[in-house]
């Protein structure tokens, strides 16, 4: 599908998602703090309201467990590409593509309250449209090993961008609400999150479309 340039409402974006008998996988990529999960859920809600079964399948459920990260001395870097189960993510994306609509496919979610993934947090079954949102959907193996096959398993992928100042403010808020002190949040944002954002930005040219929030809608570039 090709999106028209200009500002579109979420409802207009939803109307442009193709109708297919087979499952359609739409990726929403972008840096941390860009608003991917919010856009994905709003888009899903519009599709469901229009009578088109849809579900959000976030990448965040593939975080490695904290005990694994501790054993690798990587807990402080949680959220970077190698702190995810990229192979499991790719395998489950392939399962979503190959499994007929109507047959269940369990998908993990991430519980921010306990800072851990939860197995089978959602089960994809009757949904024809799966909205896959996450940071690293467009990376090559040169950028981060294990992620290159993701793009080929998505029917289309949009990149949601936001100004660096906005990302910083949102991420600082996220981490302080999550229990970090302001100093700890600042270290996490500057030493990890924004570095990840730069890596992700280098993959933007592989997206089908780049979107930025504008008012209550999104400008398509």
Image: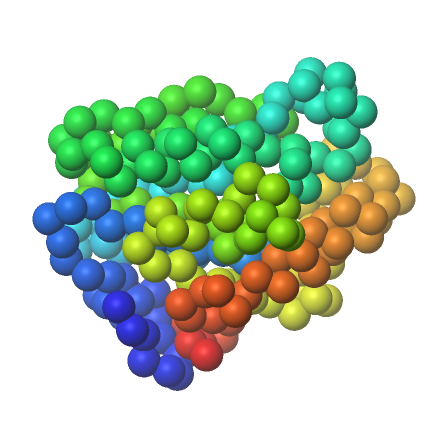
Residue 56: x and y in percent read 36, 43
Q: Nearer the viewer, residue 208 or 178?
A: 208
- In the rendered structure, the answer to whether residue 154 lies left or right of residue 76 reads left
The answer, for residue 10, to whether it is visible in the render is: yes
Rendered image quadrant of residue 115: top right
- The vertical placement of 159 against 177, above or below, is below
Residue 124: x and y in percent read 27, 32
Q: Residue furthest bottom?
A: 6
Residue drawn at 55 percent across, 30 percent down: 85
Residue drawn at 32 percent across, 74 percent down: 3
- The vertical placement of 90 against 199, above or below, is above
Q: Nearer the viewer, residue 213 or 107?
A: 107
Rendered image quadrant of residue 180: top right
Q: Check the picture and name the quadrant holding the N terminus.
A: bottom left
Q: Residue furthest front?
A: 142
- In the rendered structure, the answer to whether residue 193 lies left or right of residue 109 reads right
The answer, for residue 51, to whether it is visible in the render is: no
Residue 148: x and y in percent read 50, 48
Residue drawn at 47 percent across, 70 percent down: 210
- The vertical placement of 57 against 107, above or below, is below
Residue 175: x and y in percent read 72, 42
Q: Nearer the viewer, residue 56 or 101?
A: 101
- In the rendered structure, the answer to whether residue 46 lies left or right of residue 210 reads left
- In the rendered structure, the answer to whether residue 22 lies left or right of residue 2 reads left
Residue drawn at 14 percent across, 54 percent down: 20
């Amino acid at each position: 599908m090709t999106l028209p340039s200009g500002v579109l409402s979420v409802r207009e974006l939803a109307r442009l998602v193709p109708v297919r008998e087979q499952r359609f996988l739409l990726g929403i990529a972008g840096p941390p703090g860009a608003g991917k999960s919010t856009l994905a859920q709003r888009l899903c809600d519009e599709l469901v309201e229009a009578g088109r079964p849809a579900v959000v399948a976030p990448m965040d459920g593939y975080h490695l467990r904290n005990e694994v990260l501790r054993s690798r001395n990587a807990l402080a870097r949680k959220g970077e590409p190698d702190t995810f189960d990229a192979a499991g993510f790719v395998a489950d994306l392939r399962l979503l593509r190959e499994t007929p609509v109507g047959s269940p496919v369990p998908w993990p979610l991430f519980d921010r309250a306990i800072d851990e993934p939860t197995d089978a947090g959602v089960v994809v079954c009757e949904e024809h449209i799966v909205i896959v949102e996450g940071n690293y959907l467009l990376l090559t193996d040169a950028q981060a090993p294990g992620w290159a096959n993701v793009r080929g398993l998505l029917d289309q992928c949009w990149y949601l961008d936001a100004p660096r100042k906005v990302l910083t403010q949102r991420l600082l808020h996220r981490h302080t609400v999550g229990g970090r002190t302001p100093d700890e949040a600042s270290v996490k944002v500057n030493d990890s999150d924004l570095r990840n954002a730069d890596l992700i930005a280098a993959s933007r040219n592989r997206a089908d479309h780049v979107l930025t929030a504008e008012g209550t809608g999104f400008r398509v570039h």
